[in-house]
Amino acid sequence: MDEILKKSATEQHKMIAEKQISATELTKASLKRINDVDEKIGAFNSITEEIALNTAKKVDEMVAAGEKLPLLAGVPLALKDNMNLIGSKTTASSKILENFVSPYNATVTQKLLDNGIPIIGKANLDEFAMGSSNENSAFKKVHNPWDLNKVPGGSSGGSAASVAACEATLALGSDTGGSIRLPASFCGVVGMKPTYGRVSRYGLIAFASSLDQIGPFARTVEDAANLLEVISGHDTHDSTSLDIPVEHYAQHLNDDIKGKKIGVISDLMTDAVSEDVRKAVEHAVNVYKSLGAEVVEVSLPKLKYSIGIYYILATAECSSNLARFDGVRYGHRTSNPENLIDLYCKSRAEGFGDEVKRRIMLGTYALSSGYYDAYYKKAQQMRRLVADEFNEAFKNVDALISPTCPNTAFELGARTADPLAMYLTDIATISANLVGIPAMSVPAGFDSDGMPIGLQIMTPQLKESDLFNFGYKFEQENDFYKQFAKDVCACA
């Protein structure tokens, strides 16, 4: 059964449709895998066995009736624990929501269920999706399946680790500044952030509403493309949802890229990039050249301001969004408060972790009287300039590439005492969220310690099909995606 869990979602789906295995058998195999290894990895906050098996049973009934299966039906998926699933806990890995049970389904969750995709559990994350290492979870740290002493990346570390360790074949994460792509890079899987508005945010616990976007994790580009097709589409519950047709993204995976122009972002190839990561990007350049693409150097001078812009805007929006967690209507409520103000203060002090408190305070300061124009307004103006610079670059190239991260996964605890060093982990990924463009990390090799390296690919807004095309062509020229974590608790 372990060999079946190693197969891609496309292969598993085909096996179910052809009655080589039932959806129930596959789901039970995933659940057993979680039971066997997750104590060491910590990828899941909770397991939704009954919901998963009920979904799998419906898929098996469709197969028995000779009905055509929806896309990816029967393939086990891990859902990041900041997306609502009726009857399950949605905690955002925070003590303030430790016992909160979802009263409704997120739009993406409903789409998964409608397509017969068994949701096997809620994946661990940095508290309220705030972090780059998945060490900020209030419940437990997530460990990288390639090396249990290293971080999986954040904030969607549980989602990425579950796919890398073959606990789930697919996963959903949310990406505010790299929270899908960074853990995908560290864990050696595919992770993709769509165009802002391509996927509904209804039912996602908000961190920074102008930056958040839900996206897929998978072990192949084809699987990620198909999962994005499942979750995309307009939603009247989300005013930022784009009313545009859903594409069949996998249709253009193998399109010829000969004559296409790819820009390497020189501003992200600095001395901060490790030698192994630099070599991996250079290898990618050579692969694209061998496929007939023209590769040029592109400079984006304003990109260096992205970290500063992001940590003003994201913290400001988080300060506003997290004001709703006050101990009154739901979530943690302090015992015996003296008055209403005491209820607010103690409930939030007891319920939020240090990183969340830090970001709330930063954001509240940036929005405060006398400082709004100097910080928040200025950051919004600079965001526009960064977007203009990207739009100008895309007039000359079809895609931009860079390292997903300047380094590979680091040791657990190595950066927890230095928030600035942790924030700089996202230097390459943040700009795509500020600009609202689609971006993806694909496996691009390994460092001298055998840890995965990710290549980031970005395309203009709504050019997801092109993004998957560039990713797939690179993927198929290498065998990186076919390799599994060598740790004793992982696949091989």
Image (cartoon, rainbow, N blue to C red):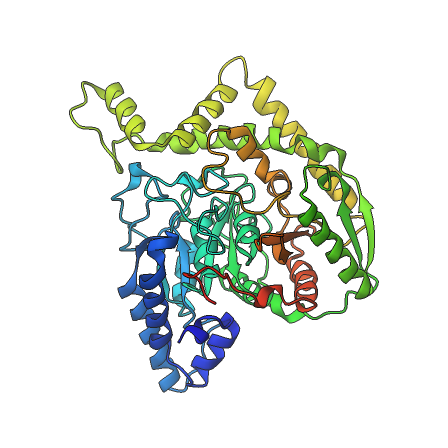
Q: x, y (%) of residue 49? A: 29, 64
- Residue occupying the point 61% across, 39% down: 434
- Residue occupying the point 79% across, 51% down: 397
Q: Nearer the viewer, residue 449 or 407?
A: 449
Q: x, y (%) of residue 196? A: 57, 47
Q: Nearer the viewer, residue 322 or 162?
A: 162
Please tell me whether residue 382 is drawn above or below residue 97 in the rendered image. above
Q: Nearer the viewer, residue 488 or 182?
A: 488
- Residue occupying the point 62% across, 27% down: 379
- Residue occupying the point 38% across, 44% down: 141
Please say whether residue 136 is visible from this viewpoint: yes
Please tell me whether residue 378 is drawn above or below residue 398 in the rendered image. above
Query: In the shown orientation, is residue 422 left or right of residue 271?
Result: left
Farthest-out residue, left: 336
Q: Nearer the viewer, residue 289 or 449?
A: 449
Please say whether residue 43 is visible from this viewpoint: no
Q: x, y (%) of residue 359? A: 46, 28
The N terminus: image quadrant: bottom left
Please count the marks in the image: 0
Q: x, y (%) of residue 458? A: 68, 51
Farthest-out residue, top: 370
